[in-house]
Amino acid sequence: MELTINGALKKGVEAHKAGQVQEADRFYTSILKAQPKHPDANHNMGVLAVGIGKTLEALPFFQTALETKPDVAQFWLSYIEALIKLGRLADAKTVLHQAMKKGFKSDAFAQLQKRLSKASKNPQHPPAEQIQAIMNLYNQGRLQQALFEVNKMLERFPNSFILCNIAGASNAGLMQFDAAIDFFKRSLKVNPGNAEAYNNIGNVLNSKGNPDAALDYFKKALKIKPKFADVYNNIGNALNAKGDTDAAIGSYKKALKIKPDYAEAYYNKGIALKDKGEQKAAIDSYKRAIKIKPDYADAYSNTCELYERSNKLAELSEVISIAKAALKKLPSDLLYYEALYNYRSQNYDHCETLIGLINIDQLAATRTSLFWQLRAKLEQHQKNYNAAFISFTEMNNTYINSPIYNAKQAQTYFDELLMRVKDLNNALETPYCQNLEESSADVPIFLIGFPRSGTTLLDTILRTHSKISVVEEKNMLSQAKKYLGNNLSTFDIENLTSQELLNAREVYFEELSKHVSTNSSGCVIDKFPLNIVDVPIIHKLFPTAKFILALRHPLDSILSCWMQPFQANDAMANMVELSRIVDFYAAAMTVLELSEKRYQLTIHRIRYEDLVLDMKTEVSNLLNFLELDWENELENYQQTALNRGIISTPSYSQVIQPLYKTASNRWVKYQESLKKYFIKIEKWTTKFGYEL
């Protein structure tokens, strides 16, 4: 026989009085499933929660009971008692005042009033003006002084969760993350219902690089305060840190639904959209942030970054002009973009003036290396090569000393490369049997070469052809390698089974389909220069694959790598010291040389220097290799570059220019610093037809 609502409530109350908590919970829950706003069931669930020490979880039940039936005195009393228990005295006073306005004036309410009045005579927090004085120090960025003052104040007011929160925030600002978390947790001991403290701990954990733990605390904050826009914004930040940009964008949208004028949420949404590759939408989001907050310097800087990276210099100049009108003084990040704009517009004198105005210590961490690179390029233009060399060294030292540089992982990557060379050398002692299982019809062409060898220029020219699709530096091969097991030896690669290879090819093409239609006519070029070190596995997967090898004078490639602040990863972290880049180059070219001996590869070589001297002849020869015809539109490759939006390689600003020869033999200007490496490079300069 099914119980009625009243019957279930009666059974629940009986179980509750008998101390049968789980049984009472079961009856109350069944009522709330049928009637979520049932006042008595909500109230009793709240009382049940308080009784087992879950006072925080009780609050939503008491709130619902009061909203549904505000004329029941006990509902008010239970809610106020819970707030007092949590230390939320100001909230308790407010609710008591509301109850008394409604006419509740029994002895129970009078007793609560006395208790709250007594608590006020022994204040939990310092006077408001003293708290404000400390907050002023915090807001002025004087964090060490704020921390000193707040610690003194905590000796007198040890239970002030406000002071604990300020101490936590000050420590977080000083990058003292563990101390910050300790203070926020201390705040929660005094005031367990403080959603802000949970939010703050989440932020610190995310800053420490632990977004998963951060998300747990953000969820706790939302349990207390479901419509907390800041928390949704911070959840977005944590999700974006995990690489889940779609979920991050969804969380920013939730924040904006609660708080439509939330400039920071628009700004962070712009960052996520940029990371997702949606440049236009990112710019729109930054502009929404600026509309709400016209002095939002970081939003201006990020907008400048996207316009500059996509070669939209007129739009870049316009944003700088708007920022100048909105801000009393351009911060260093915007001065950097103004200097960069002038450098790219060949206004070198004004660029030099602006560089002199930039305070390096005030630059965002991600732009400090870029500043040194810009300064070095200007000095290089001025033919001050010694100064340029020093500035490029500073650029690399900035990266080496940054939190994102991981020397251990860089060394591991390099050691694995050397092991690949050793493996291939040993493999040459045994015969190798070619396996031509795969169909050559849909085999991609691989554009490889040492970084900074002209692959982006070649990519841009080739993608202008109507029958060529170029996929730039995407993860097809890395996904296939991951499926097979990373760091396979040459022996392991050569002994992969037909089924393993078939499955790995499916993984490759599944990833490829995200970036280009695999059913399109013509050829697909997988452009990833450092795939040069993975030629053995490429050949095993695609035995008939063709390779385009982009070459440049070895010392120009090496020097150019050293002059670039590459995006951080284990491979490119090896590009910050000249001696390591020289060894990296030799090892990469040895992998290719040994692979050619063993696997009879089909390779077309194209030298950067020849390409810029006679583009039509060199590209025509390459097209013959690809079994394609010359198209006159190829000569308009610069327009292709402009139409591409953001180009993800350091050559993004160069491929929109006419072909120029100034990048050829640049190494000669720095030969005094490079002479000691000649002995290691001589083999490769001779092999590829260059001179030292």
Image: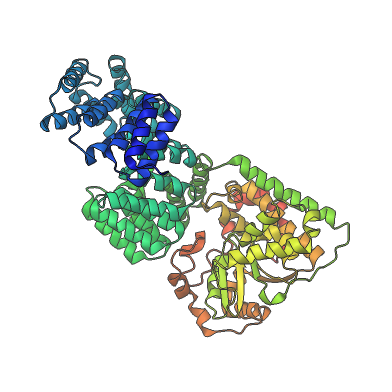
Q: Is residue 317 left or right of residue 416?
A: left
Nearer to us in this view, 507 or 529: 507
Q: Position of residue 349 (x, y in %)?
A: 35, 57
User: 648 or 651, which lies in front?
Assistant: 648
> Could you tell me which residue is drawn at 29 percent across and 41 percent down?
38
Q: Position of residue 281 (x, y in %)?
A: 37, 62
Q: Which quadrant, please, contains the N terminus?
A: top left
Label tally: 0
**What residue sits 71% from the left and 58% below the top?**
589
Asked if residue 657 is positioned above or below residue 89 in the image, the reply reads below
* Image location (x, y in percent) of residue 235: 40, 45
Q: Quadrant of residue 338?
A: bottom left
Quadrant where the C terminus sits is bottom right
Residue sitting at x 26%, y 30% = 79
Question: Residue 523's x, y, as percent?
Answer: 62, 76
Up-down relation of residue 525 to residue 467 (above or below): above
Q: Quadrant of residue 114?
A: top left
Does residue 308 appear in this view? Answer: yes
Along the line of sight, which residue is nearer the eye, 233 or 146?
233
Residue most extreme to the front: 1
